[in-house]
Image (cartoon, rainbow, N blue to C red):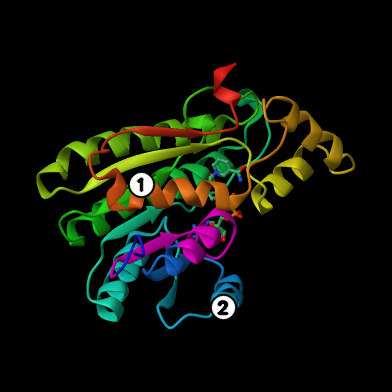
Amino acid sequence: MKRLKDKVAIITGGAAGIGKSTAALFLEEGASVMLVDINKEKLQSTSEELNSSNLAYCVADVSNPADVERYTSETLSRFGKINLFFNNAGIEGTSSSLENYPNEIFDKVIAINLKGVWYGCKYVIPKMVEGGSVIITSSVAGLKGFKDLGAYVTSKHGVIGIMRVAALEFADRNIRVNTVHPGPVNTQMMRRIETDISPDNTEEVKKGFEAIVPFSRYAEPIEIANLVLFLASDESKYVNGSTYVIDGGLMAG
Ligand SMILES: NC(=O)c1ccc[n+]([C@@H]2O[C@H](COP(=O)([O-])OP(=O)(O)OC[C@H]3O[C@@H](n4cnc5c(N)ncnc54)[C@H](O)[C@@H]3O)[C@@H](O)[C@H]2O)c1
């Protein structure tokens, strides 16, 4: 029996990386999926690649409340209900010390990673059916500090607060809200971070990150998608308000 049979899911940041991998898994498990992303070209190519009649997409900026209301209403018009919400879109910002961190980049990271998640919870969850599940993508950077990643660390700590409030406020409708906290994952985000830190030595930077992971490697997006699937499925129906670390042991040290 498919684990998400007849469920309807919204996935933000769905055109690439963790969101895309999760979309493919959700479709395999019987869900209908609305992919939301700011990048129209990537949305089109991802939709062609996933090639399913149960898939639709919406070009939207998660930091714009009007866009969030629009992707919510487009999902309801296309699929008739919302059971699952993977509130996942995010950006990394730049690598810079706190005292030198550019204010405009700080504002952009907060707008997308923190306010985008807030708007998603504000506009999507009230439209979800009872028994639904919301999964927010935080990071190991939501649980500990990392030098030179101040805006990202701040935003990823902040979404835990949103998750805890939403978990309490929507519990009477049996809607569960949890966060996932990956360590480094093999997506374009890590390629950009590696290049930002040292454009001529990206392999060395990657080795440096791998060295802080006890498994000595990045996660693959499908490994994160499998945890998101567990939290989306009824197998986790008593799990609410929790933080799920998936990091190859990084936080253990
Ligand atoms: N890759 C990692 O190592 C890692 C680790 C921990 C947490 N995360 C988190 O996982 C989530 C997904 O990251 P990823 O690695 O798949 O990155 P990615 O860059 O591969 O994919 C992110 C997607 O989000 C989209 N996006 C960016 N800004 C948007 C906006 N304003 N509105 C709508 N869509 C927008 C991008 O176009 C892109 O398709 C992010 O929240 C990220 O912070 C990633």
Taking depth in this image into account, of 57 and 6 the one nearest to the observer is 6
The residue pinned by badge 2 equals: 44
Name which of mark 2 and mark 1 comes first in the sequence.
2
- Find residue 237 and report its horizontal and vertical position in percent: 24, 45
Taking depth in this image into account, of 66 and 188 the one nearest to the observer is 188
Q: Which residue reaches farthest left?
A: 172
The residue pinned by badge 1 equals: 231
- Find residue 194 and report its horizontal and vertical position in percent: 76, 41
In space, the residues marked 2 and 1 are separated at their CA atoms by: 27 Å
| Residue 11, magenta (yes or no) | yes
**Magenta segment, which residues?**
6-25
* Depicted 19 relative to depicted 80: above or below: above
Could you tell me the amino acid type at mark 1? Answer: Leu
Q: Which residue reaches farthest right?
A: 200
Which quadrant of the figure has residue 41? bottom right
In the rendered image, which quarter contains the N terminus? bottom left
Count of numbered circles on the image: 2
For the residues bearing labels 2 and 1, Cβ distance under 8 angstroms: no
- Find residue 52 and report its horizontal and vertical position in percent: 47, 80
The dot on residue 43 is none
Helix, strand or loop at disc 2? helix
* Depicted 3 relative to depicted 144: above or below: below
Could you tell me the amino acid type at mark 2? Answer: Gln
Task: Identify which residue is drawn at 60% across, 71% down.
Answer: 42
- Classify mark 1: residues with Cα within 10 Å, few (<14), some (14-19) or many (20+): many
Q: Is mark 2 within 8 Å of ligand 1?
A: no
* Depicted 144 relative to depicted 171: above or below: above
